[in-house]
Amino acid sequence: MDINGSVVVITGGGTGIGAAVAKSLAAEGAKVVLAGRRIERLEQTVSEIKDDGGEAIAVQTDVTSEDDVSALMDKAVETYGSLNVVLANAGRFADSLMINTDKATGKVKTFMTTEQFKAVVDTNLIGTFLTLREAARRMADNGWEGLLLITSSINSTGQIGQLNYSSTKVALTLWPKILVGEFHLKHLPIRVVGVSPGYTATEILKGMNEAALEAVLKDVHVGHLVEPEELASTIKHVITNDSIDGTTIEVTGGLVYGPRARAK
Ligand SMILES: NC(=O)c1ccc[n+]([C@@H]2O[C@H](COP(=O)([O-])OP(=O)(O)OC[C@H]3O[C@@H](n4cnc5c(N)ncnc54)[C@H](O)[C@@H]3O)[C@@H](O)[C@H]2O)c1
């Protein structure tokens, strides 16, 4: 699949990884549709792309809303005439231990609320489902060759304090295999690939205090956070290499599990 001329929709496209992918693909001639809740962040990224000579539009979208996601895909087709690559990247976390006990009394002081659990499931699972379904429907109905991309996470291996987030991200690593099976059955030329970033230098992690960042980096073989541009280059490779399909690729800088725990 060519990047030049392809129509690409990216959710969570105004910031972080989504914005880096958008800029990188637009620089190679893709027509990019950026979706997210915060219109000012989307418009900022669109104007940066346009300043560099690229083509992009912003569509305010809450990925948990069926109507919003359907309207997003329609807008992409109406504006650019097709739909080729869709990156379901919008994601959120709401961390807490499931039950957190008080040091002094040993009794439960706080716990992960049902709302905290559901909010993460709604965005990361329902949002990704709606994004992929509404894109795939239009690709299939029009006979377009397509690529569905999913931003999973290395946290799919299970992170303390992220029962909600890790549960959603591990589920997403299964989707490329399931969906490619379904598309194969129905002879649809739509590939599905997940990308699992490790600790990535977006706003959340850059805001970490120095000691916490140093501790995190002790577990990363290459010794630095993954740059959003490194994920963008992985995605460019996936777009142009048709043999990458039905799988999830880890981009972690060689994240090693547990050395700090063992060293104690
Ligand atoms: N930064 C990391 O270390 C890291 C590691 C692994 C996975 N990820 C995943 O990468 C993806 C991008 O994260 P990021 O690091 O760029 O952080 P980010 O916070 O910049 O990006 C997340 C984006 O999703 C958007 N979003 C959240 N809920 C939404 C909703 N309901 N509708 C529409 N948009 C919504 C946010 O507004 C934001 O633009 C996420 O799925 C995240 O889980 C990030």
Image (tube, grey):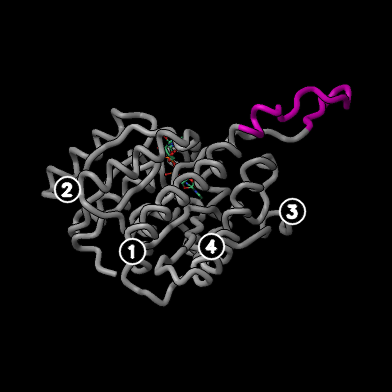
Disc 1 designates what residue?
Answer: 143
The residue drawn where x is 32% and y is 52% is 21
Direction from residue 49 to residue 180 in the image, left or right: right
Pointer 4 residue: 179
Q: Amino acid at mark 2?
A: Glu
In the shown orientation, is residue 241 left or right of residue 57?
right
Q: Earlier in the sequence, mark 3 or mark 1?
A: 1
The image shows residue 23 at horizontal and vertical percentages of: 25, 50
Q: Is residue 207 visible?
A: no
Look at label 3 and name its amino acid.
Lys
- Placement of 86 over or under 164, stated as above or below: below
Mark 1 burial class by Cα count in 10 Å: few <14, some 14-19, many 20+: few
Which segment is the magenta one? 99-118
Q: Residues within 10 Å of mark 3 (few under 14, many from 20)?
A: few
Give whichever of 24, 214 is nearer the camera: 24
Residue 11 x, y percent position in the rendering: 39, 43
Residue 115 is a magenta residue: yes
State left or right for residue 101 relative to residue 75: right
Q: CA distance from mark 3 to mark 1?
A: 57 Å
Kind of residue indicated by mark 4: Leu
Label 2 residue near ligand 1, CB within 8 Å: no
Would you place residue 104 above or below residue 176 in this image?
above
Q: Quote the CA–CA distance across marks 4 and 3.
A: 43 Å
Residue placed at 50% from the left, 46% from the top?
128
Viewer-proximal residue among 51 and 182: 182
Q: Which mark identifies residue 55?
A: 2
Rendered residue at 15%/50% (across/down): 54
